[in-house]
Amino acid sequence: MGPTTKSLVLLLAVAGGAVLLGASVVYARSSDTASVGSNSFALDSLDAPTNLTATGGATVTLNWTATPDAYATGHRIFRSTSSGGGYSQVGEVTPRTTTVFVDSPAAGAYYYVARAYYENWESADSNEVAASCCTISNTGLRSPTAQAADTGGDGNGFEDNPTNAFSLDGSDARDANSGTGTGTTCGSTGKDRHRYHSYGFSVPSNASILGIEVRLDASVNNPSGTRFMCVELSWDGGSTWTTAKSTANMTNSTATYTLGSSSDAWGRSWNVSNNFSNGNFRIRITNVSNDASQRFHLDWAAVRVTYAAP
């Protein structure tokens, strides 16, 4: 069909394929086509993570290889008390490249699987792994079997009967004075100090240390002024020490003072294989008073280690 021409006065518009030609508008009809390539669709399944492993102890640490599907949001962790099913979700980690999760269940044996997820879409289960957690035990209060005065103060520590602190029997080790200065901090170099060691600990090599308690049954001669004991722990035979903990001010009657707890690791991670050997583990007691003639009495210097074993 050819163009159709109509007269138009003062029409200034172009629409519907119209072209302004002077005082007339020419309407043209046109068409065009374009080829579209073939389309194809592929089905995809969200791949599960692989190589799931579990390490038990004070907690359960899970590691895995991430799903290869880059669009996945992350992974979900499921736990059961029975093998093969009955799982409940206990964790979710993102992004997809995060491949570790730490679980802290009650004591018991558990089974785990992991799944990849994207929005509300989850993969199949990974391989199942088992781990035991949190079988908490302790060494009981252990007595030292060796001792030595440390440097500091007058250099002789508990100079009178220091081995009396090996057992709780009413017989005291005595420090006849608290040193050569009147400083009142655990780090004062003028304070008398003494080491006790060789506790004969028996801790499983695969255990995780949860806490260490030091029990001092002690007293002072004069219940006035500043009068307390500080304790540090060493894991390498006395080359390195933890930050000190201190008792309250002592009385002139023997009382029990506990430093640390079953959940206090004294600010470090302990290596069971060597830190608790008789040759490496030490406690160091520092007697602190603003009176250099203060007398300190120590009936027992016991230690208890609390640990979790798979």
Image (tube, helix red, strand yellow):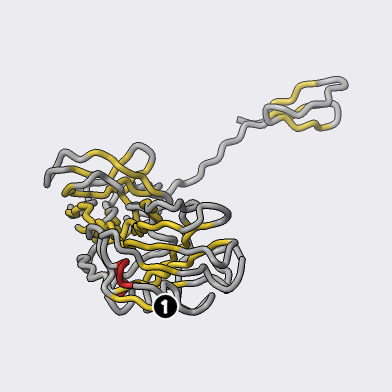
Relative to the observer, which residue lies in front, 5 or 164? 164
**Left or right of 3: which side holds 153?**
left
Q: Quadrant of the N terminus?
A: top right
The local crowd at label 1, few if under 14, some if 14 to 19, many if 20 or more residues have their Cα within 10 Å, is some
Relative to the observer, which residue lies in front, 163 or 61? 163
Give the SS element for disc 1: strand
- Which residue corresponds to the image point at 20% horizontal and 67% vertical from the top-left? 202
Which percent across, then down, holds residue 32? 55, 40
**Left or right of 256: which side holds 223?**
right
Does residue 161 appear in the picture of this structure?
yes
Which percent across, then down, holds residue 203? 22, 65
Which percent across, then down, holds residue 75? 34, 48
Which percent across, then down, holds residue 139? 22, 60
Does residue 50 appear in the picture of this structure?
no
Q: Quadrant of the C terminus?
A: bottom left
Establish if 128 lies above or below 119.
below
* Disc 1 target residue: 149
**Left or right of 80: which side holds 213?**
right
- Callout 1 amino acid: Ala
Relative to the observer, which residue lies in front, 187 or 22? 187
